Image: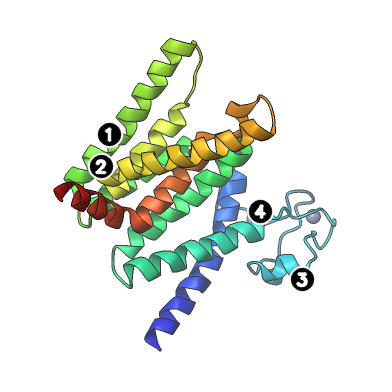
Amino acid sequence: MDEAVALAGLALLGLVIGSFLNVCIHRIPRRESIVSPGSQCPQCQYPLRWYDNIPVLSYVLLGARCRRCRARIPARYPAVELVTLAVFVAHYLVIGLDITLVPRLLFACTLIVLFAIDLEHHLLPDAVTLPGIVTGLAFSLLLPPGIVSALLGVLVGGGVLWLIGEAYYRYAGQEGMGGGDVKMLAMVGAFLGWKLVIVTLVFSSVAGSLIGMLVLATRRGGLKYALPYGTFLALGALVASLFGERIVAWYVGLYQL
Ligand SMILES: [Zn+2]
């Protein structure tokens, strides 16, 4: 019974916070405030009433259009709300009702925001990654992975990608990876520690390569621009946040055999 209440509570919290993440995703790349004005239609500035702003439900009831100007509401809105719900529930099922759930959910929210902004704008804003690094380190002072692992995580995460970017730049003569990727992986390190940074890198590289090959097989050119690396980093970091400790334990166990 308690389990069901906690599950329902987290699902609801995921929907509500997902709705706020949509505001962040729309406004941060446009350098607009995320607190004021309240939610409004980007087309006609119609200020949304509470019943226009119910996660998922309003989108369905309004037929994906603004009540006043009938502008289309992007499917991203309900998608982000449902993904946030799923990510919250998944973390609860893996971690349980534990204090570490707080930094992990916060971390997952930044990943969702970075994923969506990178997908649309090919941009990983400093306004998200830099406060993310500070917040991750602050939580790691008191909670797992601990401050030493977190500081190493920032160094490993930032350092490895910086080196790859630098090598690519010298080899190809053009920027392969933006500074945003470097700061994003440093943020992953601040929240998850150095071991899970490596898990994140492995998973994002595998996912990137698989989807890259798929894109190469189906169409030509524009590969670099079709696939912002931050989206793969976000997916890899999410896997690491949920299953990283188990993956590391399994891997270490394998080598102790
Ligand atoms: Zn409108």
Q: Are marks 3 and 4 in contact (CB under 8 Å)?
A: no
Q: Residue at x 56, y 50 (%)?
A: 24
Please give left or right for residue 214 compared with residue 124 in the image. right
Mark 2 crowd level (few <14, some 14–19, many ≥20, 10 Å Cα) = many
Q: Which of marks 1 and 2 precedes in the sequence?
A: 1
Residue type highlighted by circle 1: Val
Gap in angstroms between the C-alphas marked 2 and 3: 45 Å
Q: Residue at x 71, y 62 (%)?
A: 48
Q: Nearer the viewer, mark 1 or mark 4?
A: 1
User: Circle 2 is placed at which residue position?
Assistant: 194
Q: Which of marks 4 and 1 precedes in the sequence?
A: 4
Mark 1 element type: helix
Instruction: Tell me where residue 235 appears, x and y as whole percent.
Output: 47, 48
Q: Residue at x 65, y 26 (%)?
A: 222
Q: Which of marks 4 and 3 precedes in the sequence?
A: 3
Please give left or right for residue 234 compared with residue 150 in the image. right
User: Circle 4 is placed at which residue position?
Assistant: 76
Q: Are marks 2 and 1 in contact (CB under 8 Å)?
A: yes
User: Circle 3 is placed at which residue position?
Assistant: 61
Instruction: Tell me where residue 221 appears, x and y as whole percent.
Output: 66, 24
Mark 3 crowd level (few <14, some 14–19, many ≥20, 10 Å Cα) = few
Please give left or right for residue 193 compared with residue 220 in the image. left
Q: Are marks 3 and 1 in contact (CB under 8 Å)?
A: no
Mark 2 element type: helix
Instruction: Tell me where residue 63 appears, x and y as whole percent.
Output: 80, 65
